[in-house]
Image: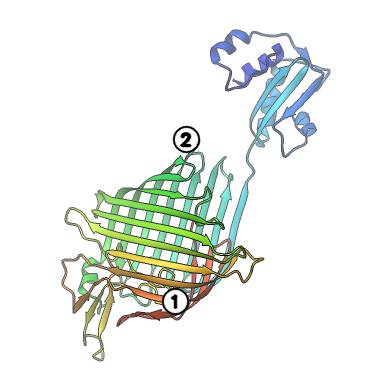
Amino acid sequence: MIRRICTLALLGFAVSPAALSPSYAQQSATTPAPRVFTTIQVDGNKRFRDGDIIATSGLETGTVLGQEDLLAAVEALEYTGEFENVVITSSGNNLIVTVEETPEYSGGLTFGLGFDSDTGLFGAAGLALDNAFGKDLELRGNLVVAEEAQTLRFQARSTNFWSEGVRGGVRLAYENYEYDNTTYDYALAKVEPYVVFDLNQKAALELRYTLASKDISNVAAAASPIIVAEAGRKTSSGIGFSLATSSSLLGGEESVLDSWSVRFDQDFTGLGGDTDLSLSKLSLFARKSLTPGGLAIRTRVEFGAVTGLSGDKPRASERFTLGGASLRGFARGTISPRDVCTGCAVGGGDQVTELGGDYYAAMRTDVLVPIFKDRDSIETFAFFDIGSAWGVDTSTAPAGTLNSDRNFRTSAGIGMSLDTQLGKFEAYLALAENARQYDELQAFGLTFRSEF
């Protein structure tokens, strides 16, 4: 195609690759006589001087240029790696060199240290690269290493997967949790290819396949027989979809104006592997400005359910817990159905095992108070949270009493958050209300979240 276009330039035709059919090119591209051009014009150039492009091409005005000269100019420019496409055409005695520049690489690595109430002191590294290994290719990664949790997540995504309006890529994750306030350790390894279709300017549909390995290990001797029975590694394989819509092209949660978003996630396992489950989540978000000065209210409502199919039952690795960032004022993972064995602990106390619930619902509401108006990355707010996790579908008898009722807890307080390149840090001071027996309160919390 490049050779034919160069030949037509000598004949005096102005053409583009999209408009040129192979049959027409072969009929028109006879061997032309070399020509002399009085001017050389460069189109599409943004990063370089036109003179430098002409010098690199080897083209000169006032000299006889033939087909091989034009082809050599195209190859010289493409060899630099700065141009994805080069087309040479002509109009009269004017030679036109049209270049399409290779997108510039951007991004890099970010490192940091922090403290989280759930995991303790941690180190984090973030990766963000755009166009480093190809046009429209985005790479995102995040590594967090703490005493009680280690997570590694990576995503490669093309914003132009196979056509305009279609994105796709793959997500990889490894997560290991060894929380002091649980009776078991949990590890996850996952690979998830996906494709996203833009349904319109404000709605998108994601289709995905997920292959995951989940391991429940190091179960404490005093743990509930339910957790003991669920210990071990299981592999899951399945498909899922997400349907999302929002009021803003940027996404409802990223907008600083009045906005809303709705997202529904549905996954099914059972395409091979050891599990046959249905996992559903619904998330609603809304933000409303109250005054021109920046006072605003935002709220997020979440619902989730995991159910067994074909006789299978969820394990603790699939069930839901609340606390920490998901329900401020309570310790991470402690709002959950429990197996309570009265007098079974060493010394005659009660032995309590958090099991996780098959269902959960939570609402987190913030009233944003613009104290630091000149710092967009800092938010100050008052909050009110409410949530519960309930229901345990198991065939194993508990050691004591299975408390799995839907009892909602509430909390209120004040907080501050800071957005960084690594993620969001949030500190809060909470007063828990409607707490139940065996709830683990957390009046002061410092959390770190990283999402991509």
Check residue 162 in the rendering and tell me which mark sits there, or answer none. Answer: 2
Q: Is residue 35 left or right of residue 292?
A: right
Element class at badge 2: loop
Residue type at the position of mark 1: Ala
The answer to whether 389 is drawn above or below residue 250 in the figure is below
Q: Quadrant of residue 179?
A: bottom left
- Viewer-side residue, 37 vs 204: 204
Q: Is residue 46 left or right of residue 393?
A: right
Q: Position of residue 272 (x, y in %)?
A: 25, 48
Quadrant location of the N terminus in the rendered image: top right
Q: Residues within 10 Å of mark 1 (few under 14, many from 20)?
A: many
The residue under label 1 is 412
Most distant residue in the front direction = 291
Residue at position x 53%, y 71% from top?
A: 381
Residue at position x 31%, y 51% from top?
A: 267
- Viewer-side residue, 362 vs 104: 362
Residue type at the position of mark 2: Trp
For residue 58, say whether it is visible: no
Q: Earlier in the sequence, mark 1 or mark 2?
A: 2
Residue at position x 64%, y 8% from top?
A: 30
For residue 221, say whether it is visible: yes
Q: Position of residue 282 (x, y in %)?
A: 36, 56
Mark pair 1, 2: CA separation: 48 Å
Most distant residue in the right direction = 62
Q: Circles 1 and 2: CB distance less than 8 Å?
A: no
